[in-house]
Amino acid sequence: MKVDELITKTKDSLQAKMVYAEPYEKDGITVIAAATLAGGAGGGTGRDEKGQEGEGGGFGLTAKPTGAYVIKDGKVRWEPAVDVNRLIATAGAVAVAALLVALRIVKARRG
């Protein structure tokens, strides 16, 4: 893939329709899901010792749910998505840090 093609595909990929889903309506309630996107791209050209030229590149995109807008009776509210894995990892890190602090306090009092 040529670098200019990569740039074009990257621009085409990053559109609002990738962040907000199509509205879903049921029983008078409309839900519009939203996501956070992150991406990166790189490319380059080169020439070997025989004078042969080449170019290439790559592009990566990741998305994760952020939440949803809920519309009911003409009122809009934001419902954040809960990342259970991140919540558990954070709670685990806090527990380990608290344990290490407690051990230091116990050692300091003994000696």
Image: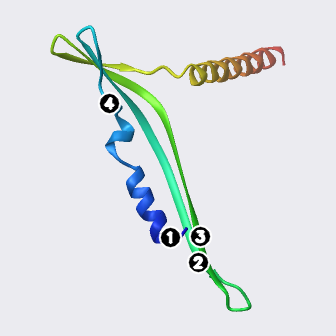
What whole-number distance in Å separates the C-alpha atoms at marks 3 and 4? 34 Å
- From the image, tell me which residue sits under label 4: 22
Disc 3 and disc 4 in contact, CB within 8 angstroms:
no
Q: Amino acid at mark 3?
A: Gly
Instruction: Specify the amino acid type for callout 4.
Output: Glu
Name the residue nearer the viewer: 76 or 110: 76
Q: Quadrant of residue 43?
A: bottom right
Disc on res. 45? 2
- Above or below, 41 against 31 in this view is below
In this rendering, position of residue 52 left or right of residue 74: right
Q: State yes or no: discs 2 and 4 in contact (Cβ < 8 Å).
A: no
What's the distance in space between the residues labelled 1 and 4, CA to CA? 32 Å
Q: Judge left or right: residue 71 versus residue 89.
A: left
Look at the numbered discs 2 and 3 and tell me whether their residues touch, using CB distance below 8 Å. no
Which quarter of the picture shows residue 85?
A: top right
Image mark for residue 3: 1
Tag 2: amino acid = Thr
Neighbours of disc 1 within 10 Å: few (<14), some (14-19), many (20+): some
The amino acid type found where label 1 is placed reads: Val
Quarter of the image with the N terminus in it? bottom right
Residue 90 image position (x, y, % from top left): 60, 23
Tag 1 or tag 2, which sits nearer the N-term?
1
